[in-house]
Image: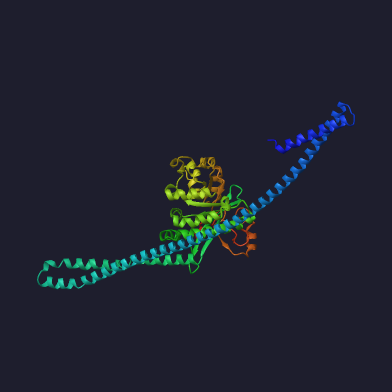
Amino acid sequence: MIRISTIFIAICMVLVAASLGLVLYSVAGLSGLESAIVALTALTFLILYNAVSMRLRDRTDVGGQIADLSRGTADLARQVAEFGRRLTAVEGKLNSLNHAGADRIQAVVGEINELGGLVKQLAVSVASHEDMLSANAAAAAAAPAPPTDAGRSSRQEPSFAPETPKLVASAPPIVVASPEPPAAPRGEIQTFAAVKTAIEENRLDIYLQPMVTLPQRKVRFYEAVTRIRDEHDRVLAADDFLPFVEATGLIGRVDHAVMLRCVQVLRRLMVRNKDVGVFCNMAAATLRDPTTFAPCLDFLEANRALAPSFVIEFKQAMFRNLGAAESEHLAALAQRGYRFSIDHVTDLRIEPRELADRGVRFIKVPAALLLDPKMSSASDIHPSDLSDLLGRFGIDLIAERIEGERAVVDLLDFDVRFGQGFLFAPPRPLRPEGANDAVSAGKQDANTTLKAATVETPVIDPPVRATGNAALARRAVGPN
């Protein structure tokens, strides 16, 4: 909309130009055409002057407004940055409080579970002792009865004499059998105390066994195997302590400690080789219990950058008996980018689509099971076609427990891409830095070397090729 001042200025310019023309016509004696030309020329100059002056004035006003807007934007940015800093500080405090509270709750729950296990073992031991005392008392009360009955029967009622040997013969089994029941609870209590002490004193050892590509035999993954050392530095294999640890509620603490060590090892391995990965086992009891699973999930959430190289391994029986809690926790891990593996496979009745939907990317099958001719008739698919079927759903087949070269040749016909077993290397313990010479010597064997393990802090003893002494090496190290 045209402003009134602009209209007034235009009228004034027209009047000034007309007045100039009239003055020239009447006073200067110019003709009407010449006077009109001079008047139009003057009007044109007035219009140009007004336009230029208005443009300069508007430019000055716009520059001031832009400067004011810039100052306001800078003030707003500083205020937003300050609010962001305060919000970050508040979130950090809340997270620290939440983690501290979760750690305290986890510690209290762990102590309660341990006390419950001890009370249960104590109750069993007390009951067995009571049974033993009752049996001894019954045997002591029954012992003097035969002479009395025998004397009375010899004098009064001979017909009761045959019952005396029955009573005497029945007493010894009670006395002999009664001391044995307390032996098992006492052994379990000692084992529980040894395992609990080992966990509290961080005597959990990690053994690494490589998984190699076939037929190149290049190390691609490592499986972390847990061992526990007692107070006498005797190594307990997984089969010796895991069932007991699951029964006493300590499996959550063991899994959390093993995950911590596995992540540390993976970080050091990735310094030399970005393509290496680590398989870490998790018990079904840990996945099932929300209390023990929560700290593991928080730890994996904090290290989700390693998810592409960190594979969590479960047993086949667990996937076949999934409950609501297990499915929810598996979905939470898969949502954070973690992949799963299945081991302890007992048969080839596998549903690859369902497993792939749950995040399974690896299946470990014993080489003996794949090469067993009976499996072709007992399973839904021939073992030679299993690798191709799993590959259609993004799942890799790993043949484990390989102990001979003949097995490798047969597995290559089955298109198996990965292998694991004593033929390539047994599980080797992590050892302190300082044995780099031995590791360099072990690198000479390209089939069994653990190249990615020669890293900064934890390194691995040089692997031993198990060509003819596979069974001996397996007995020395323990089961996988």
* Coloration of the structure image: rainbow
Vertical placement of 13 versus 435: above or below? above
Residue toward you, 43 or 464? 43
Q: Is residue 24 left or right of residue 123?
A: right
Q: Position of residue 223 (x, y in %)?
A: 54, 54
- Quarter where residue 130 is shown: bottom left
Residue toward you, 450 or 327? 327
Question: What residue lies at 64% left-to-right and 62% top-to-bottom?
Answer: 436
Total marks in image:
0
Q: Position of residue 296 (x, y in %)?
A: 50, 56
Residue toward you, 255 or 382? 255
Question: What residue lies at 81% left-to-right and 36% top-to-bottom?
Answer: 46
Is residue 445 visible from the viewing direction of this image?
Answer: no
Q: Is residue 83 left or right of residue 26?
A: left
Residue at the far left in the pictured view = 156
Q: Position of residue 445 (x, y in %)?
A: 63, 55
- Quadrant of the image containing the N terminus: top right
Q: Position of residue 219 (x, y in %)?
A: 60, 52
- Quarter where residue 113 is shown: bottom left
Residue at the far front in the pictured view = 27
Vertical placement of 342 versus 112: above or below? above
Residue toward you, 133 or 44? 44
Is residue 227 visible from the viewing direction of this image?
Answer: yes
